[in-house]
Image (cartoon, rainbow, N blue to C red):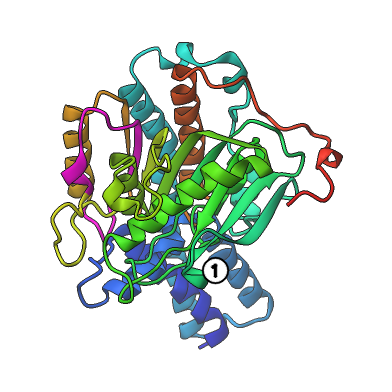
Amino acid sequence: MPIGYLIPVALAALGTLFALRPVPFERPLGRLSYYFGLAANELPFAAFFWLLLLPTALAFAQGDIDSAGGWAIVTLAAVTVPGLAAIAHRALGDRARIARALDQGLGAGWRATLDAGLAAGLRRRPPLARILFLPILKRRPDVRRVAGLSYGDAGRRNLLDLYHHRSRPQGAPVMIHLHGGHYDSGHKNSQSLPLLYHLASQGWVCVSANYRLRPQAQHPDHLIDLKKIIAWVREHAHDYGADPSTLFVAGSSAGGHMAALAALTPNDPALQPDFEDADTAVTGAVYLNGWYGPYFDGEPGSSPLDHIGPDAPPFFVAHGDLDPLVPVTDARNFVDRLRQTSNAPVVYAELRGGNHAFDLYHSFRFEALIDAIEAFTVQVRSQGQDPPSLKPSRKLGAEISGRP
């Protein structure tokens, strides 16, 4: 049996199986199902080419299919292809489903309310070349990453990375993103990078930050760190071309939980020790594959559900219906509660077949979400009479020499 051929085909088959039928994370095989299924679920085209098509062609070219074992592997590859096709089909369909979610959350005719200058920068089609050929490559030549800026006194856990267009347009809106990791792991420069790099390429200033982790930190330490980040941005982001009066907060998984808490508790002095006077209100929130319940010790007030009120800012929530870590019913419950109470728009995009960490790659699903998130921010900014279009100049040489 050609082992070198078996390995990639087996990986593709396992990933396809777990993408179609994920095992809940807490059950046996749950962790294996999560990691194998995630890659196949978000990158079915890459799995087909690199793990099935290319290895099969090489195996035939090298004469490895000369036994019953070899033909058994070919058969496994063949039966895996329809599964990957089904995964790709439902991912492609998410663009239409996300568009309907925008219509439902923002109201009929919302596109007609957009500021023409802001709407001009919206992308018309997904980046097919990146999705098909460079799905794991995040960096862009027109975006500069300024790494390791300190916003607090907790060492490396209080560092942030800042992304801005090299032409440094002035008056840029800000997006802050917090990584996931169960509040006990994870780091900046890991999640939602396709979103941050895209927005930065459009003239935004984006921030991805570390925060203190369990067990050394507990609730509300993480939330206080996010509020410190917001305060830091309000004080320092002008140096990078930002106008932090327009500031969105986003997060993935535990980071989404934290972002929602920050959005729903603006300027709470109990959560801003020694910086009570800082403005920590946000323009809107983006909640990706989040956790919606209380903190691990069940502390009262540690769930976003505890803070929903009529003055909540606009929310964009996205959750996969096959998320093996957080049931989709939790997302639906949060959105229902928020819509019943908040006076601001709430967009809820439920992703068919979506796994937990759908924001890691340039996939058809996440690129559709990126376009929707950008459209959501344009609509919110249009209602707030944001400045005209901040699409960056194409002259990269416009960057100011010597500035941080």
**In the image, residue 375 lies at what x, y percent?**
49, 28
**In the image, residue 3 lies at what x, y percent?**
53, 87
**In the image, residue 131 lies at what x, y percent?**
59, 49
Determine whether, in the image, residue 104 is placed left or right of residue 191.
left
Q: Is residue 117 above or below residue 181?
A: above
Q: Is residue 93 above or below residue 402?
A: above
Residue 176 drawn in magenta: no
Query: Which region shows up in magenta?
Result: 304-327
Can the viewer see residue 336 in this picture? yes
Q: Residue at x 79, y 34 (%)?
A: 394
Element type at mark 1:
helix
Determine whether, in the image, residue 333 is placed left or right of residue 48.
left
List the residue tagged with mark 1. 51
Q: Relative to the observer, which residue lies in front, 131 or 339?
A: 339
Determine whether, in the image, residue 3 is placed left or right of residue 220.
right
Amino acid type at image mark 1: Leu
